Image (spheres, grey):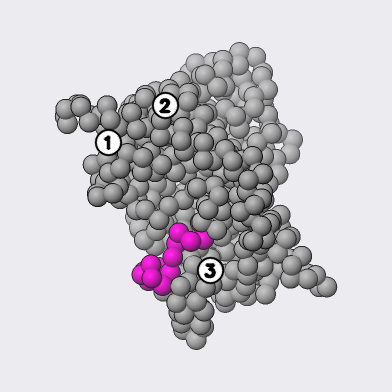
Amino acid sequence: MAGIRQGESLQDARKRYRTDAKKMLQEGYTNYKRKPFYVPTLEGDKLMVPPHFVDELKNLPDEQTDAAEPVFQAFESRYTLLASRELLHRRTIRNHLYQNIDSQKEDLLDETRASIRDTVGPCQAWTEVSIAECMIQTIARVSMRALGGLELSRNQAWIKATIGSTDDAVLGAQRIKVWPSLLKPLVARYIPEISRCKQHYEDARKIIVPILEAREHIPELQRPNDFLTWMTDEAKGSEKDKTFLADMTLNISFTALFTSTAAVLQLLYDLCSMPEYIEPLREEIRSIQEQYGKLDRVAIGQLYKLDSFMKESQRFNPLVLVTFTRWIWKDIRVGDFLIPASTNIGCPAQAMLMDSDMYPDPSRFDGFRFSKLRSQPNLDPAESASLQWAAATLNNMPFGYGRVSCPGRQFASMEIKMIVIELLMQYDFAPLEHRPESLCHDANVLPDRSVKLSMRMRAPE
């Protein structure tokens, strides 16, 4: 068992995991390295497995390893209603989303510029900006533009439901998690965030169902080219139920907002605390724009320095410390090690990324660490791809690994880069004296949303 201090009880160690998970996981990884180890959590003792275990476990059927159950537990889905075992969204993302990014590029860029203009404002002089509030609104609108076009991105009731459900699900899960299982059904009635979760889904249905009904009367060739259309086309059997589709749309919105907002805020905090990186990033953006004439998907893919800075920022402050989470339904033997049924497993992904065997001087932030590696002569294209922010490999698992790794990570990469490009090219940022500390809740690493950044509009180039 890793992370238990001398003289500390197991129960106290489980409680401490809520705020000290990063240190406990790092200690376990350092001490056990390529071996499995347990770490105490409020959800019970979790088994952390090394990468070579992951490679063997990744293709096992759902009857043996379940990727959904740990998510249900982490987000207390019985009460927050968040998460689903349904696969419709994965099929839709895999078959349509990234392939259609270029066709949506101008719409997404339009929404990026409009939302930043509306939230950040002109800032003609140095202005204190509540950046988290601005980025939550911006990412909600840009994501919703891809999801349902202007019908969703400019629908304030939908944006309110999306942001409200995200905040209430996260906070509600944190608050109910500390209670014993037997008391949770009773306590849930008195937690305001959980009480509001059901209302968010009802609000979502009132918005999405009429949109879906109206679209049934639009000729096929005139239908919007957005996620709602693709998801409707992919739906089979009971998935075609409009209430189900509305619930799925809200769940997808949560994932997009929760993950991308955290990534953008962490990146901005890193940039403002290390402003020496800002001008080299701007210069790369200018160079690629001149070379390609426009910033389409291919051109944005050439922004090696920006991608590298995103990846280094994520290495230090990922949204989750543990990925490849699975619930084991049946005994599984990996080599000489037996993983018993009813075990919650995961991989200490962030601790791995601080391993000196993997990265030289891992405790030093090097924003261009990965762009330098990708710029090596005669580098194999597959190796270069494995060094990207959105890569999901055994050596880089912030997005999981295998058949249920995050399917929307390529879209998220594009979205984040579009937003950061717009911010860097339109605004100056005053340096931060100290980098804001992240807030750790269990295995989640969340950016401090109280931070204000001083910003000023730049002169047109």
Q: Residue at x 69, y 56 (%)?
A: 178
The residue tagged 3 is: 345
Residue type at mark 3 is: Ile
Q: Residue at x 22, y 31 (%)?
A: 216
Q: Is residue 125 left or right of residue 418?
A: right
Residue 376 counted in the magenta span: no
Q: Earlier in the sequence, mark 3 or mark 1?
A: 1
Residue type at mark 1 is: Thr
Residue type at mark 2 is: Ser
Label 1 SS: helix
User: What's the distance in space between the residues labelled 3 and 1, CA to CA?
Assistant: 36 Å
Q: Are marks 2 and 3 in contact (CB under 8 Å)?
A: no
What is the number of the mark on residue 229?
A: 1
How far across and how far down the image is residue 303, in percent? 43, 39
Q: Is residue 51 left or right of residue 217?
A: right
Q: Earlier in the sequence, mark 2 or mark 3?
A: 2
How far across and how far down the image is residue 397, in percent? 49, 59
Instruction: Assess disc 3: are there few (<14), some (14-19) or many (≥20) residues with their C-alpha within 10 Å of its C-alpha.
Output: many
Q: Is residue 244 above or below residue 278?
A: below
Q: Is residue 141 above or below residue 232?
A: above
